[in-house]
Image (cartoon, rainbow, N blue to C red):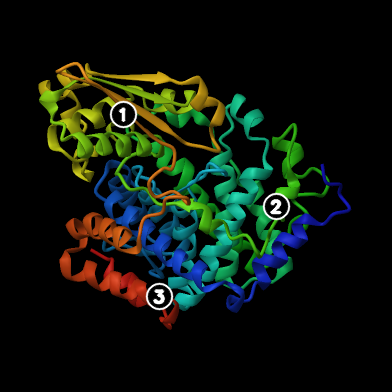
Amino acid sequence: MVGEAADLTGELCAYVAGLPASHVPPAVVERAKLHILDTLGAMLSGSVLEPGRLIIDFVRQQGGAPAATVLASRVRTNAVQAALANGTMAHADETDDVHHSAQTHPGAAVVPAAFALAEAEQRSGGDLVTAVVIGYDVICRVSRALDRPWMYERGLNFRSISAGFGSTAAASRALGLSEQQTRFAMAFSATQVSGLHTWRQDPRHVDKAVCLAGLPARNGVTAALWAREGFTATSRVFDGPDNLFQAFCEEPHPEELTRGLGTDFEILGTGIKKYPGGQPVQATLEAYFTLVGQYGLREQDIRQIVVRLPESEADTVNDRLMPDINCQYLLAVAMLDGAVGFAAAHDFPRMQAADVLALKERVRVVADAELTARHPVVRAAIVEVTTSDGRCLGQMVDRTPGGPHNPLTREEIEAKFVSLSTPVLGKRRTGRVVEQMRVLETLPDVAGLARLMRA
C-alpha cells in the first residue's frame, strides 16, 4: 500500500482542476461526444420507465430555481435536483455504457452531474466534454483502487461509491474549482458515500437506478457546490488519517488512483451497449444472432438453447424478474421477433405471455468454469443451439459488441440514440440533437442543447 507521504489526493485533484482542455487528444474528444450522446439517449428512454416517471414527479414537487433541465419533461430546477433526476433516468434500464475492468457504469452518473452544472453555469460544449473525460478517469480509477471483492462480500456497493467520486470530479471541473476546493469536494463525496446490494431485491429497477446513478450524480454536484461556497474538510481523503480506504477496504490499491493519469483516458476503455439489455446479455445476444444469420434459423428450427456464461453473469441473468436482464426472456423474444427492441426488453406483462413462457423452457443458462476463470478480463458467452433436425451449432463471443475491442461505429451509436430518442422527442428534434452533438466541442453554451431535450 502506498504510504501517507504520497499525496495521491493532491495529485488526483491537481489533475481534475488543472488538465488543460488542449491536452485531451482529439480521439478522446470524439469518443467522449459519443458517450455523452449515448447517455443522453439512456436518459430520454429512461424517462418513460417507472424509475424515470417517479423521479420526474418527485423533483417537480421539490421545486427549485430553474437553472437546469430535467430531460424529457417541462421541469427546470437547480443543478442538484436535475442531476438526481437525470442520473436516475440514465440508469432506469440497462442501455447505458459500462467499463469492464472497473466494473462501473460511468456515463449514468458522470454525464448528468456535468450536464446539469454546464447548463446552470452556462459552460461551453468544450467545457462539458473535458469535465466528462475527467469524471470517467476518476470513477474508474477509484473503482480499481477499492478492495472490490472484500466490499462485495459485505454487501457494500463499490459501484455507487466510485460513481460519487467520478461525479464529484466532473462537477468540480464544470464549476472550475481550484485544486484545494477539489480536495474538499472529494472529502464531501466521501462523507456521502453509500450503497448496498439490496437493490437486487427490487424487481422494478428503481432502487438500482437511484443507487448507481441518481444519488452519486446528486451527491457529486452537492459536494462541488459546497466546496465552491467555502465549506472545508480534510485535504487528504484518499491517503490521510481515517481515509476512504481504511474505512472501506482490507487490501486497497490506492496507486490505481494516479496510474497513467493524463495519458490513459478511461473513456477509451468504456463500452457502449449494442442491445437494450444488461451487460451480461450482450455477448449472448450477439452469439445467438450470429448463429441465426449464419444458418438462417427460425423459431421452429430451434429445439434447445444452452447459454454458457461466467458464474457471476450466469447468476445475474438466469430467469431474473426484470425483462431487460432475463436471458431466457430475451432469447424467447429474439426467437419470436427476430430482434430485441427497447419496448420488448422492458415489457413486464409480455414475460407472462403463453408463447414467451413456452420458448423460455427451451433456454438453459449454465455457469462455465473456463469462462469464469477468464472473467472479468474477458466477458464471453457461448451459445449452443440444438436444432429440430438434430444439429448442434455453437458460437462463442469473447469480444463483447460495443466493448473497447469491438466498438460500435459512430453511425451505430447515433442510430441507437435515434431509436431511443425519437419516441420521446420526435424525429425533428432528435435529428437536431445529433447534429449539435457532432460539433459539441464548438458550442459556446450547452443551454441550447438542453432546450432541445425538454418535453
Q: Amino acid at mark 2?
A: Leu
Which of the two residues, 422 or 288, is positioned nearer the viewer here? 288
Residues at marks 3 and 2, CA–CA distance in whole angstroms: 29 Å
Looking at marks 3 and 2 on the same chain, the residue that comes earlier in the sequence is marked by: 2
Q: Amino acid at mark 1?
A: Asn
Residue visible at 52% across and 49% down in the picture: 216
User: Are there few (<14), some (14-19), or many (20+) residues within 10 Å of tag 3?
Assistant: many
All told, the count of numbered labels is: 3
Q: Quadrant of the C terminus?
A: bottom left
**Residue, x 32% and y 59% (percent of image)?**
413
Residue 247 x, y percent position in the rendering: 73, 37
Residue in front for this viewpoint, 439 or 307:
307
Q: Quadrant of the N terminus?
A: top right
Q: Quadrant of residue 289?
A: top left
Residue drawn at point x = 34 percent, y = 29 percent:
203
Q: Mark 2 = which residue?
A: 257
Please identify the residue farthest to the right as the structure is shown: 5
Q: Which residue sits at x=29%, y=69%?
A: 434
Give the labeled residue for mark 1: 326
Left or right of 88: which side holds 348?
left
Q: Quadrant of residue 252?
A: top right
Rendering quarter of residue 346: top left
Specify whether 323 is left or right of 241.
left
Name the residue that disc number 3 marks. 440
Amino acid, disc 3:
Leu
Sequence-earlier tag: 1 or 3: 1
Q: CA distance from mark 1 to mark 3?
A: 36 Å
Q: Secondary structure at mark 3?
A: helix
Q: Specify whether residue 136 is in view.
A: yes
Q: Secondary structure at mark 2?
A: helix
